[in-house]
Image (spheres, helix red, strand yellow):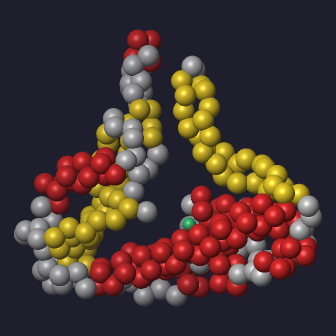
C-alpha cells in the first residue's frame, strides 16, 4: 500500500487522497501481502531482496523485513562477518530452463541455494547495492511521471504500457480439431494521458491483442505504432509521444 499510494497519486494527479484514506478505500477483494514483506513493488528485485533479508533474520541479524526500509538503513559488512555461520542457506527467484512436452521453456521459480560465508557476503553486498539503485530509479520515475503528467503541453501524449499475461485462446464452440489449434496471445494494456481543451488531464485505456509472444522492446514499438491511429482521435494533432513501461 505504501508503494501503491504514490503510484496512484502519480497516475491521477487531479485527485487529492491521503495515504490513510487510500488504504481505507482498498476494495475487499484486493488483499495485502503478508508474505515476506509488507511493502513491495512485486518485481523480482524487490522479492529477492526480501528473501535475502529473510535469510539474515533467520540468523538473528537485526535487519528490517521490508526491503525498502533496509535500502534506507543499510548494513555494515562487519555485522555480517560477525553473525553469519560458515554456510548460509537462502532462496532467490531465478529464471530456469525446463523441458515440457519436449519443448524447452523458461520459468521463474524460487530456488534455494547455499553459499560459503565470504561468498554470500559478497553476493549480498552486491545485491544490496543494485537494489538501492533500483529503488531510487522507481522513486525518481514516479516523481518525473507525475511532473510530466501535470505539465503535459497541448498535443503531447504520455503513454504507459505494460505486458499482461499470455493467454491461450479457445474456440467458443469447442470441437476436437479446434482444441489442437489453440494459439497463445499476448494482451498488452496501454494508458494514454493527454490534456483536453480546458487543460484538464484526461486518459484513455487500450488493450492490444497479438499472437506475438516475445515481450521484447521491438514488440513494444510495433504495438505503439499500431495504437497511434487510435490515439490520433484523442487530440487534434500529436506533436510528441512519451512512453514508458515498467
Ligand atoms: Zn521492484
Observer able to see residue 238: yes
Task: Count the marks.
Answer: 0
Picture quadrant where residue 12 is located? bottom left
Residue positioned most to the left:
236
Please tell me which residue lies in front, 31 or 164.
164
Identity of the residue drawn at 39% across and 19% down: 181
Ligand 1: give its quadrant: bottom right
Looking at the picture, how far across and down is residue 123, in whole percent?
71, 63
The part of the image, by quadrant, that contains residue 128 is bottom right
Left or right: 133 as drawn, with respect to 214:
right
User: Residue 7: x percent and y percent?
Assistant: 47, 75
Q: Quadrant of the C terminus?
A: bottom left
At x 41%, y 82%, the residue is: 143
**Residue 72, image quadrant:** bottom right
Q: Is residue 207 left or right of residue 117?
A: left
- Identified at 38% across, 62% down, the residue is 245
Residue under the point 34% across and 37% down: 212
Q: Nearer the viewer, residue 166 or 21?
A: 166
Establish if 172 lies above or below 61: above
**Which quadrant: the N terminus?**
bottom right
Q: Against 156, is 123 above or below?
A: above
Q: Position of residue 238 (x, y in %)?
A: 11, 68
Residue sitting farthest toward the front: 118
**Relative height, residue 16 to residue 115 (above, below):** below
Residue 64, image x, y percentages: 76, 77
Q: In the depicted view, which residue is nearer to us: 244 or 198?
A: 244
Please state if 88 lies on the left or on the right of 8 as rendered. Answer: right
Amino acid at each position: 500500500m505504501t508503494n501503491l499510494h504514490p503510484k496512484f497519486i502519480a497516475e491521477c494527479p487531479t485527485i487529492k487522497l491521503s495515504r490513510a484514506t487510500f488504504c481505507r478505500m482498498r476494495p475487499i477483494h484486493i488483499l495485502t501481502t503478508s508474505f515476506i514483506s509488507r511493502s513491495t513493488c512485486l518485481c523480482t528485485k524487490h522479492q529477492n531482496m526480501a528473501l535475502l533479508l529473510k535469510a539474515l533474520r533467520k540468523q538473528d541479524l537485526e535487519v528490517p523485513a521490508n526491503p525498502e526500509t533496509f535500502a534506507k538503513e543499510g548494513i555494515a559488512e562487519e555485522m555480517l562477518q560477525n553473525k553469519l555461520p560458515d554456510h548460509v542457506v537462502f532462496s532467490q527467484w531465478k529464471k530456469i530452463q525446463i523441458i515440457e512436452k519436449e519443448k524447452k521453456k523458461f520459468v521463474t521459480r524460487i530456488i534455494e541455494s547455499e553459499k560459503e560465508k565470504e561468498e554470500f557476503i559478497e553476493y549480498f553486498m552486491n545485491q544490496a547495492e543494485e537494489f538501492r539503485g533500483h529503488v531510487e530509479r522507481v522513486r525518481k520515475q514516479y516523481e518525473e511521471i507525475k511532473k510530466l503528467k501535470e505539465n503535459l503541453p497541448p498535443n503531447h501524449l504520455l503513454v504507459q504500457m505494460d505486458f499482461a499475461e499470455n493467454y491461450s485462446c479457445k474456440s467458443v464452440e469447442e470441437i476436437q480439431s479446434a482444441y489442437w489449434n489453440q494459439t497463445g496471445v499476448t494482451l498488452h494494456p496501454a494508458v494514454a494521458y493527454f490534456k483536453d481543451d480546458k487543460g484538464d488531464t484526461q486518459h484513455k485505456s487500450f488493450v492490444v491483442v497479438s499472437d506475438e509472444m516475445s515481450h521484447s522492446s521491438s514488440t513494444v514499438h510495433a504495438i505503439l505504432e499500431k495504437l497511434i491511429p487510435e490515439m490520433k482521435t484523442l487530440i487534434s494533432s500529436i506533436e510528441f509521444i512519451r512512453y514508458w513501461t515498467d
